[in-house]
Amino acid sequence: MNQKSLIIFLSALLLFLSINFSHAQTQEPDDEVVQGVREQIQKQVEERVTSLLEENKKRGWSGTIIKSDNTGFQIDNSYTNTTREVLVDPDTSIISETRQNLDIEDLTVGKKILAMGYLNGENILVGKRVLVIGEDDSQRNRFPAFGTLSDKSINEKIITVVSNKDKDIILQLTINSKSTVETLDENKVDYDDLVAGSKVALVYEDSEDEKIVLSMKILDKNDQPQATPTLAEEN
Amino acid sequence: MKKEVLLAIIIGITLGLIIMAGVKFNSIKSFITSDEKQATIADAVSPTPTSTITPTPKSTYAISIISPENESIIETSSFDLIGKTSPLSTVVIIAEEDEIILQSGPQGEFETSVDLIGGENIIEITSYDSQGGEAKTNLTLTYTTADI
């Protein structure tokens, strides 16, 4: 009986040691798996925290109503090219263009609105205040430009600016009383002090018959003697 | 007695070695499989170019707005616009009733105060570098003093 027990004991001991040893050899891949799982959990937690933070932020969405019922409406924003959903409830303030209180039924398809409220977890705006705003057909007609002042007229206050990005883009711009021309450190620059070759950044208004400088900054003045000024050629 | 003990040791070692060899084989197999998986993921993320010519990296001239967030509601008539672009770029900001031209700092950072009108404000921000690089982004903000 003792001999048998000893044989079983020794066999079990060796078996145990062998399994332990082989298990220790497989630790490295297990650690990689654990690390992977840990990273995945961390990523999911970060996403959830971001989503929760986003949920409580106030947001303002504008657009044209394309679908409406008594719980809310869908708006289409052609500027951002998005269609989104806004929920309303009896507590939501709905205000007309003339500052009159409206009901949800008054929010009909085609109306342009500005909805203010909070995002819920499904990226739907829970509207707290909805303003009906007039259809704004006026396109923004102010544009930025960056280039080199290549020429200026002596007869009129007209400058020629060649784009730095594309030399084929040549702008002829009028400077008038609406225009502000300054250096980067905000020192006023008169038309007579403009020098060909200067790098400029500007915003101009594109009206029907002319482009007018609204704001222009001289970035680096070229103090080289300038060529005789000529009347800027039409593009 | 001695014979039996020796026999037990030999049996134990043999059995242990067989189990160890089995486990080791499995672990190597799973390690190779995970390596293959990683290689597949890495290939999907950055596919090896089929051509031997090294592709030239595309220009990454960009602009980003740090604050405020797009489509935020602002309760004051002006706000601080904070953004980042390439160092020493020229940044042109066109707000509803205002135009601002400034230069980014040595790290590409820029900050300025922008006035708002009541309701929706679309702010266009364009950045230029001296090499002709141009990057553009828009910010839509709502200015209201009403309780939301």
Image (tube, rainbow, N blue to C red):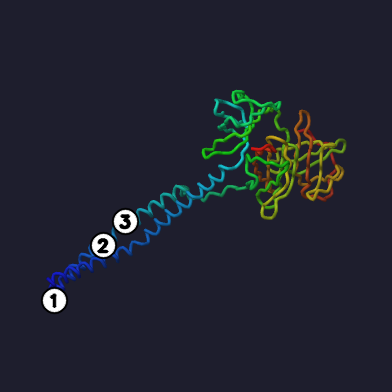
**Residue that mark 1 sits on:** B2
Which is nearer the N-term, disc 1 or disc 3?
1
Placement of A141 over or under A225, stated as above or below: above
Residue A55 lies left or right of residue A194; in this view the side is: left
Residue A88 image-quadrant placement: top right
**Residue that mark 2 sits on:** B21
Q: Give the secondary structure at mark 1.
A: helix
- 1 vs 3, front mark: 1
Q: Position of residue A156 (x, y in %)?
A: 86, 35
Residue toward you, A59 or A208: A59
Which is nearer the N-term, disc 3 or disc 2?
2
Residue toward you, B20 or A109: A109
**Residue that mark 3 sits on:** B29
Residue toward you, B99 or A143: B99
Q: CA distance from mark 3 to mark 2?
A: 12 Å
Q: Position of residue A141 (x, y in %)?
A: 73, 33
